[in-house]
Image (spheres, rainbow, N blue to C red):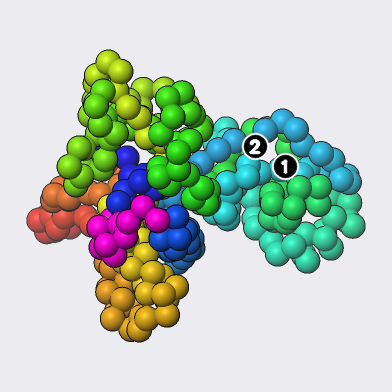
Amino acid sequence: MYYAAQDIMEYLLASTGGGAQDSEHRLLRQAAHHSYRDVMNARDWNWHISEATLTDDAVGSGDGVKSFTLPANVKNVDALVPPYTYPVVTSFVEPVDWLRMDTLLPTLNAPVYWTVMKDPALPDRYQIRMVGNPPNVTFKYTYRRRPNPLRYMGVEPACRQTGFTVDGAVRRYGTAANFPEGMAGIYPYTAEEIIGLAGSLVGSPPGGAKTVVSDYIDASDPMFTAILSSCEMWVAKLLGKNIEGAMSVQARDLRMAFEADVVAPYSGRRNGSGRVGIARAMGYYSPSGPDTGA
């Protein structure tokens, strides 16, 4: 199941008793937009960890210096990783320290110092800048992606037109007689897919099915619950109502989302077999063995 902006709108229409008036849709759209932004920026979610490779469009800005423009969805960078076959050390420095190093001629086999700065040519993009005689090898980096702001909520007339498409959005298929709704709707969708992502189709759409397109919600289950609670808070705020009760529920759901924010859920007993990681090699999680003596 893919969460979509359509799910948020249907929840708000059900919880607030909203109708089809344009003014009410405007208020609910505002609430959805602001709550999504708030939850996405509440912390550096592990759910949003990604990895990529630095492209070859490096721009030399001095002796031994390389600059790489990062994708538009990069929120922050965690680590710069060289190939394991190349003995080089990478070390993050603050931009001010990088500027000082940029004025010095780097020495051979010096560590690769790197930092992240705004791209001077693209206001909404960042750059990784390396100094210290960086080798001509392919570096990988881990980062946290920044979800795109919501735009298509699934209630716009264009989103319900046959053939309407937006890369990265969720397209849901209903039946020939009814537009698709979320899983909690009276007419739940028969199939859904992420537009432009091969192999993402779930279900079998019937022939001539009506479709609805809305933005993809890049969130886990607990995160999505926090988004819905935040929407209620924003609706109350926009209507000028008391928001203390809604804020209490939002804070609770947000704390639960923090606790459930994991990359790879793992359960079961640690038996120490078939896996040697850093923690295992350092002695952590090691099962106690018999004392065999000297």
Picture quadrant where residue 19 is located: bottom left
| Residue 31: % across, % down | 43, 63
Quadrant the N terminus occupies: top left
Q: Which residue in the structure is indicated by mark 2?
A: 54
Identify the amino acid type marked 1: Phe
Mark 1 lies on residue: 68
Query: Mark 2 is on which residue type?
Result: Leu
Verify whether residue 119 appears in magenta: no
In this image, 108 relative to 273: left or right?
A: right
Q: Magenta span covers which residues?
A: 11-21
Label 1 vs 2, first from the N-terminus: 2
- Expressed as whole percent of the image width and height from the top left, the position of residue 213 reads 41, 36
Identified at 76% across, 47% down, the residue is 122
Disc 1 + disc 2, Cβ < 8 Å: yes
Image quadrant where residue 159 sits: top left
Dot 1 alpha-carbon crowd within 10 angstroms: few under 14, some 14 to 19, many 20 or more: some
Residue name at image x 69 percent, y 49 percent:
125
Q: Is residue 196 above or below residue 129?
A: above
Quadrant showing the C terminus: bottom left
Is 19 magenta? The answer is: yes
Q: Is residue 15 visible?
A: yes
